[in-house]
Amino acid sequence: MGKNPLIILGADHAGFKIKEFIKRELLKKNYPLQDVGTFSLKRVDYPDYAEKLALEVRKNKQRKGILACGTGIGASIAANKIAGIRAALVSNSRDARLSIEHNNANVLVLGGRPFNKEETKRIIRIWLNSSFQGGRHQRRLKKISNLEKKYLGAVK
Ligand code: RB5
């Protein structure tokens, strides 16, 4: 399984349980993993973990991140502030597939409160096994990169 990409895992306290569940599932499948925390249910701030994860993911184009907070909303807003990150908040396997096929998302974001184990396994499996379609979608991703250049850091 040497071809599996490095998966970076991160979560706040409300995403801790789903992160640990995903970690166990991916370890069974021999994915190389890096866990940036949090490592307990003690209350923390999701932007800190979104940042830690995003900085690891964007080091290398092959890397992928799986990030969680209570709803997934705060973590996805925070991660998408970091240039080079395309974080997709997903709640079903169809969106998981399309977030790769159309958006080439490099971070999957999940809500951990509550979470369904079987649906989570399905989302992860499909997300990790889908392929970017390129073509017109590549043109749109280029426009997103242009938005980053134009606006990120521009708000005073
Ligand atoms: C933490 O209570 C919660 O606000 C956080 O996990 C997340 O859901 C924010 O969007």
Image: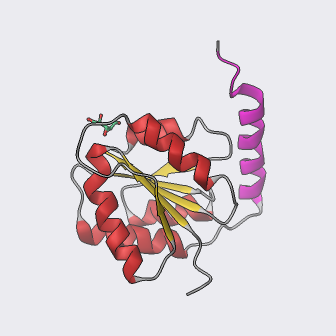
Split into 4 quadrants, where in the image is the C terminus? top right
The residue depicted at 37 percent of the width and 61 percent of the height is: 92
Split into 4 quadrants, where in the image is the N terminus? bottom right
Q: Main secondary structure of the magenta part?
A: helix
The residue depicted at 59 percent of the width and 57 percent of the height is: 106
Instruction: Give the answer, above or below, for where 8 lies relative to 124.
Output: above
- The reply to whether the magenta stretch includes residue 85 is no
Residue sitting nearer the eye, 71 or 57: 57
Left or right position of 154 against 35: right
Left or right position of 22 against 144: left
x, y percent for residue 10: 42, 52
What is the quadrant of residue 13 in the picture? top left
x, y percent for residue 6: 57, 69
Left or right position of 87 against 59: left
x, y percent for residue 4: 57, 78
Instruction: Give the answer, above or below, for where 78 lies relative to 122.
Output: above
The reply to whether residue 70 is visible in this rendering is no
x, y percent for residue 105: 58, 56
Q: Could you tell me how many numbered marks the image carries?
A: 0
Magenta residues?
A: 136-155
- The reply to whether the magenta stretch includes residue 145 is yes
The residue depicted at 26 percent of the width and 72 percent of the height is: 118
Instruction: Give the answer, above or below, for where 142 lies relative to 35.
Output: above
Residue sitting nearer the eye, 25 or 120: 25
Ligand 1 lies in quarter: top left
What is the quadrant of residue 93 in the picture? bottom left
The reply to whether residue 25 is visible in this rendering is yes
